[in-house]
Every structure is written in C-alpha cells, then in structure tokens.
Image: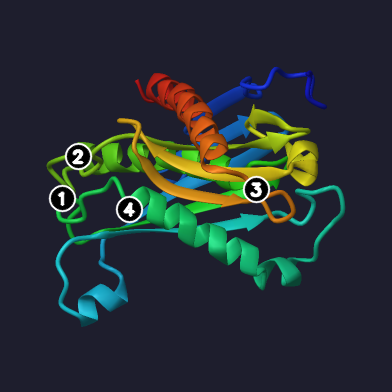
Amino acid sequence: MLRPSLRKSGQMRPVSMETAVNKWAEGSCLIKIGGTQILCTASVDFNQPVWKRMQHKTGGWVTADYSMLPRATDARKSRESLMNDKRSTEISRLIGRALRSVVDMELLGKHTIYIDCDVIQADGGTRCAAITGAFVALSLAVRWMIQNEHITENPIREHIAAVSAGIWNGELILDLDYTEDRDAEMDANFVIAEDGRFIEVQSTGEQHPFDKSQLGEIMDMAAAGAKKLIDLQKQVLD
C-alpha cells in the first residue's frame, strides 16, 4: 500500500546534507529530509564546562541545544513558548547523549563543543534529522581542531545517525513524515552506530500495543535506513 507520501514502506524521503553553511561556526550542516530542514552548527570552546572544572574532571564535553523557529510548523509559535518548551529540552538531551556515545572525551582534551540544532521547517522526524546533521557538524568541528593543532587525534570513534520507523495502517514504514507520524499506530526513533548497534530506542504504541516480532522488524528496517544516512554523511565529509 502506498503511504500518504506515495512512498513504499521502506523508502526514505529525499535526503541532503550541505556543509559549511555558517561562516563563523567551526562546523555546520544544513540537513533536509523531505520537508524537514534543520541547521546544525558546532562551536568550539577552549574550556571545559564549569561542572567539570569544579569537580576536577579530565577530558572535554559535547552538549547540544535543539530549538524550533517560530514558523517552523503550520501555525506560528511564540518565541517565549518555544524557550520554555519541555519537548525541546528532552530532544536537546537526546542529541547530546547520542553524540557523546561515540566521542572519546579524553582525546577531546579540555574543550567543549556546543551543538545547536535549529529547526527551520518541521515535517516529521526532526529529532532524527537533528542527530544525523549534528554528527556532520561535530565531525567538521573536530577536523578544524586537528588542523589547527588544538588536539592531535580524532576523538570520534564511529559515525551515528538516527531514523524513525513505525506502524501505519497495519504496515511497517520507515522515516515517518508529519502526517504519518500523527496517524501512526506505533512510532519509534532509533539512534544507530555505524557498526549497526543501537544507541537509543524511543518507541510508543499508546493506543496500539506492539509485540516483540514487530519491534524486531522495525529495528531491522531502521538499521537499513541509518546505513543509508551514514553513507551520505561519509560522502559529504570526504
């Protein structure tokens, strides 16, 4: 059955990643997945975060902030409401956790890399697109640090990407857009490493419980989607 987006069940939306889109950031990536567009920037601070310094910790840190522009969705949201949005806080933490899972903080030295993910336009899958684009921005910032002799080794162990999958109209589908996400019986977000291991899984079937076999099939579908995203990451970083 064709989906509302006229895609096949395992077909992703068109994906593009454009680098060096911000003049000042040490790393930047504009990622577009279907109608979703997110600007990801990575900024290098030559200091540890305050909490690490106070606790006399070694190594660096990677942290993230996610936010939406007022007209990223079909109806304008006030800037004040966006600043106090608990969803954005939760996604910010997710992005930070995902990136830190593949970074050796000792090799990063006493530096902090701040990732900012700003949603220009939202059409489903923004947290997944943010993680995927943020990894590219982070990689470019690390490359800049090595080229400028701030660190000597690459602290990034492997690529990561994130993709959504779920059940819509009784069918397993990959990369849900807004309409599909709104009407899905079950939807999930997967953060997946280059070697195929899962870093984080967020899934819900609030009104339509799902079983282990369905989850396994969805995870296989998500892993295939993440591989395509990682292949594209590698292309744009070459």
Kindly identify the residue that appears in the image at 26 percent across and 65 percent down.
47
The three-letter code of the residue at mark 3 reads: Val
Look at discs 1 and 4 and give the one toward the viewer: 4
Q: Residue furthest right?
A: 75
Q: Label 3 to label 4, Cα distance in Å?
A: 21 Å
Which residue is labeled 4 in the image? 100
Residue 226: x percent and y percent? 47, 29
Mark toward the start of the polypeptide (1 vs 2): 1
The three-letter code of the residue at mark 1 reads: Leu
Which residue is labeled 3 in the image? 119
Mark toward the start of the polypeptide (3 vs 2): 3
Kindly identify the residue that appears in the image at 82 percent across and 27 percent down.
4
Callout 1 touching callout 2 (CB < 8 Å): yes
Q: Secondary structure at mark 4?
A: helix
Mark toward the start of the polypeptide (4 vs 2): 4
Which residue is labeled 1 in the image? 107
